[in-house]
Amino acid sequence: MKIILELIGITIGAGAVGGAIGYLVRKNVAENKIATAEETAIRIIQEAEQTGEAKRKEALVEAKEEIHRMRSEMERENKERRSDIQRQERRLLQKEENLDRKIESFEKKEEHLAVRETFLSDSQAKVDALYQKQLGELERLSGLSTEDAKKELLQSVEEEVKHETAMLIKDLEQQAKEEADKKAREIISLAIQRCAADHVAETTVSVVALPNDEMKGRIIGREGRNIRTLETLTGVELIIDDTPEAVVLSGFDPVRREVARIALEKLILDGRIHPARIEEMVEKAQKEVETLIKEEGEAATLEVGVHGIHPELVRLLGKLRFRTSYGQNVLKHSIEVAQLTGLLAGELGLDVKMAKRAGLLHDIGKAVDHEMEGSHIQLGVDLCRRYKESALVINAVEAHHGDVEPESLIACLVQAADTISAARPGARRETLETYTNRLKQLEDITNSFKGVEKSFAIQAGREVRVMVVPEVVSDSDMVIMARDISKQIEDQMEYPGQIKVSIVRESRAVDYAK
């Protein structure tokens, strides 16, 4: 234990001595570094003082040089400004001199103008006096006052303008016809040549042939019950007269007439004619006619090449098979209009399918016009709207008789095709009374114009020739009168095709040799 304590004491003593020695060594090292640092600092300060002095001198020199340069520039600028000021002063002096000269010239001109104005005033007074004197002399010599002379001059100018207007109208119409007729004739003739449709003329009666006259009694039945049953079920009148081996079915509804005809033919073939059998056959005939209507409508759409039409519209198209207009079958007419419209649209580069669709449906209102109130145009528009047809088709249906303005070229083509189909020779026929009334109305319209001596409707009402009094109607007035007559005919009459207005004026000079 004692040894350990001694060893610890020796270790502590050695550590104290080592610490003292290390402290002394570090102190010497630190003093040496401090001395070195002080020397370095003194050297750096001296170098910095020397560098600063050199830069101060350099900056001073540069400043002096800059001051000198700026002084030189200022002097140069001042010199240039003085030169500019001197030039401007010289220009101002020149302008002042010019202004003085101009003012002097204007003063002289004013004096001259004042003298001239005085002279002109005196001359104007003399001219006015002379004009009034000459005007009075002219009125005395001519026997016309100033107002009368003005009226005569205006009248002559009016006549001249009227003549020029008439000539201009004539030239424009001739030019338009020359430019349009050739192309229109080409397109329309091509369309007509490519389209051919059969037309069936049907009347309000149908005739059913009988195998013998004894069948008439069986059709009438005991106390007329068979004929009454048939008339009640079909709504058609049976006319049994002295016509051999024939029964006439009379009725305005062609569908009902067709039902009655088919039922009667079946009854004749069957031989058993009594009320129960009649009812059965009428029911079968109604189904057959309904099937026929549907087939005719589908056949029409297939023939034209129009698809996607509502089934109800297709059925109504089939009903047109039994509808006629002036003897023209409306279904055949609609097919023909559709084909013509499609051909015309193809020539003009329009939508052919849409044109055919509009042409096929343009008279669809005639399928229900005997069942509902309103014109076939309005009924057709309502049907097309109900079954979601396009606005273009609706407008074509509404505008094909000119009730509204056409909104597309296809609507115009439908109008043209409808007119072409209706105006074809033999397509339609009218009663004698209607025909004569139209001729009389045509002549009455032309006779209502001032200066008309006589008028004649010729060529079945397709042309009217008007004889005018030459003293009342001049050559220039003829052009305007022809146009006015045409407009009035268009407004007051309904007719297929077109009516030509020809005005004839004859001037004669008569003298006698004695």
Image (tube, rainbow, N blue to C red):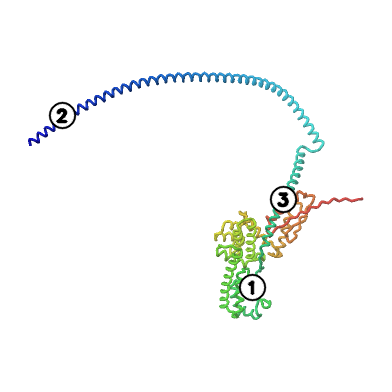
Q: Where is residue 398 in the image (x, y as percent from the top left)?
A: 61, 57
Identify the residue under disc 1.
249
Q: Position of residue 192 (x, y in %)?
A: 68, 61
Crowding at dot 3, Cα within 10 Å, few <14 / some 14-19 / many 20+, comes out as few
Label whose residue precedes the other's in the sequence (3 or 2): 2
CA gap between label 3 and label 2 equals 140 Å
**Identity of the residue drawn at 79% across and 33% down:** 136
CA gap between label 1 and label 2 equals 159 Å
243 or 418, which is in the foreground? 418
Residue 416 higher or lower than 104, as above or below: below
**Residue contact between numbered discs 1 and 2, judged by CB atoms under 8 Å:** no
Mark 3 against mark 2, which lies toward the viewer?
Answer: 2
Mark 1 against mark 2, which lies toward the viewer?
Answer: 2
Report the amino acid beneath label 2: Val
Kind of element beneath mark 3: helix
Crowding at dot 2, Cα within 10 Å, few <14 / some 14-19 / many 20+, comes out as few
Identify the residue under disc 3.
175
136 or 234, which is in the foreground? 234
